[in-house]
Image (tube, rainbow, N blue to C red):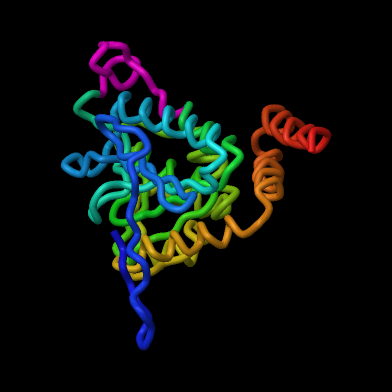
Amino acid sequence: MNNQRVDGAAPAEPVVWTPIKHYEEILFELYDGIAKITINRPEKRNAFTPLTVQEMIDAMAICREDPSIKVIILTGAGDKAFCSGGDQSVRGVGGYVGTDKVPRLNVLDLQKMIRSIPKAVIAMVAGYAIGGGHVLHVVCDLTIAGENARFGQTGPKVGSFDGGFGASYLARVVGQKKAREIWFLCDQYDAQEALDMGLVNKVVPLDELESTTIEWCRKIMEKSPLAIRMLKASFNAELDGQAGIQELAGNATLLYYL
């Protein structure tokens, strides 16, 4: 809940998030046309399991189909971590192993879903966005970071890597040299360094993180939903190849039905 005020002004209306659907490992809430998906595993620095990812995919599908949801926020519970990547305690042969004993890398499906959903997705980052959690914020349309945010990759330390959006799209965002530095050195970067390299859009004090993110959501909601949809598909088309062209062309077809 956020209830900030400007000096000399009346207190702002409190932000009250209403549950949309209950899950085990995420929170899925709505406020004023804004959906918020929160990885709710703070004791694990919001590391994800196959169940976490499946629940996020389900929530994203609801966001896509519900016309009352205009913008989506992706975040992590607490102020210590946005997401620290895959939960290594459930890593097995062939992927991350859920309670059904089936190994999966279903986070790749989530990444594609974030890219293709025809609504803006904003990463709201407090604390660590590391490894697979770093890739999650990268594939979001925008990133707003608290001053305590830290970004980086860890995969090559243990023989892992993300050769998809985590590398190719990252290079589009920060440039080839910087992207290679991020992956080859596995250093961590603070919020200001991330802002300087274009990895995030804005850095704010931690206690202003949610209110600023909501403000950005409202600015987006003032714009044409169709324009936002078409722009997102257009931005993605080059990198996403034939699938990106299909997404853009499909969205353009919608104009016939208006």
Percent x, y for residue 93? 29, 15
Residue depicted at 38% across the width and 83% down the height: 9
The image shows residue 5, relative to residue 137, as above or below, that is below
Q: Residue furthest bottom?
A: 8
Percent x, y for residue 140? 50, 46
Residue depicted at 57% across the width and 36% down the height: 117
Depth order, front residue of 138/76? 76
From where the camera sits, is residue 44 visible? yes
Percent x, y for residue 110? 46, 31
Residue depicted at 27% across the width and 50% down the height: 81
Q: Residue furthest left?
A: 43
Magenta residues (range) = 91-108
Q: Residue furthest right?
A: 256
Looking at the rendered image, the quarter that the N terminus falls into is: bottom left
Percent x, y for residue 255? 80, 38
Depth order, front residue of 20/73? 20
The image shows residue 56, relative to residue 93, as above or below, that is below
Depth order, front residue of 55/8? 8
From where the camera sits, is residue 154 visible? no
Total residue callouts = 0
Looking at the rendered image, the quarter that the C terminus falls into is: top right
The image shows residue 7, relative to residue 153, as above or below, that is below
Left or right, residue 247 beside residue 58? right
Residue depicted at 41% across the width and 67% down the height: 203
Q: Dividing the picture into quarters, in which one does residue 21 lie?
A: top left
Q: Is residue 104 magenta?
A: yes
Depth order, front residue of 117/12? 12
Q: Is residue 195 magenta?
A: no
